[in-house]
Image (cartoon, rainbow, N blue to C red):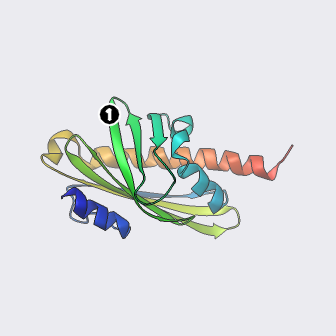
Amino acid sequence: MFEHDAAARAAAYRVAEAAPIAADGSIVISAPARTVWAILNDIDRWSSWQPEVSESRLAGPLAAGTSFTWTVGDTVLTSRIAAIDRHRRIAWTGRAMGLTAIHSWTIEPLGPNRTSVRTVETMTGFPSSLFYASADLQSTNPKWLADLKRISEQAGVAASHPN
């Protein structure tokens, strides 16, 4: 898939349905949707709650077209926000090791203090299967989601119990 095609898909919150590498996951978080949104999209602070991310930096406002870099292990990734529907959805694209990724997140309030989060990601590129597989990508989803749940619920408890 060409990078332009990935950007067009992500701008519509779509992934590459026929991609050789794909993963998705979801979780329910006991925190308000605004709290979950704020934590997920504070890209500069990802490393404070995601052990796999050692550094991350947003290069401008949280808006479509803004790029960000982040480091996972020894891999430095450059991504670009493709679409954003504040407090509901965000999608970005990225390239690393010859692979083009599309990553989409959906945040849905289930009540004042319950939020459903779904993430879908695909990767394409040659030779994708030599470097990475769906099982590798799928193994990252539970970690991201569990970490997001933990930090969001901690923030939600702190907000409901002011000093």
The amino acid type found where label 1 is placed reads Thr
Residue that label 1 marks: 75
Estimate the x, y position of residue 48 in percent, counting from the top left.
56, 35
| Residue at 69% over, 47% down | 155
| Residue at 62% over, 62% down | 33
Q: Residues within 10 Å of mark 1 (few under 14, many from 20)?
A: few
Toward the front, the furthest residue is: 60
Estimate the x, y position of residue 127 in percent, counting from the top left.
12, 46
Q: Looking at the picture, does residue 87 appear above or below residue 140?
A: below
Between 128 and 41, the residue placed more toward the observer is: 41
Q: Quadrant of residue 136?
A: top left
Q: How many marks?
A: 1
Q: Quadrant of the C terminus?
A: top right
In the image, 150: left or right of 113? Answer: left
| Residue at 69% over, 62% down | 113
Q: Looking at the picture, does residue 33 appear above or below residue 140?
A: below
Residue 105 is at least partly visible in this image: no
Residue 140 is at least partly visible in this image: yes
Toward the left, the furthest residue is: 127
In the image, 122: left or right of 90? Answer: left
Q: Quadrant of residue 87?
A: bottom right
Estimate the x, y position of residue 79 in percent, counting from the top left.
36, 48
Q: Secondary structure at mark 1?
A: strand
Toward the right, the furthest residue is: 163
| Residue at 30% over, 61% down | 7
Estimate the x, y position of residue 23 in percent, counting from the top left.
33, 55
In the image, 75: left or right of 30? Answer: left
Q: Quadrant of the N terminus?
A: bottom left
In the image, 93: left or right of 155? Answer: left
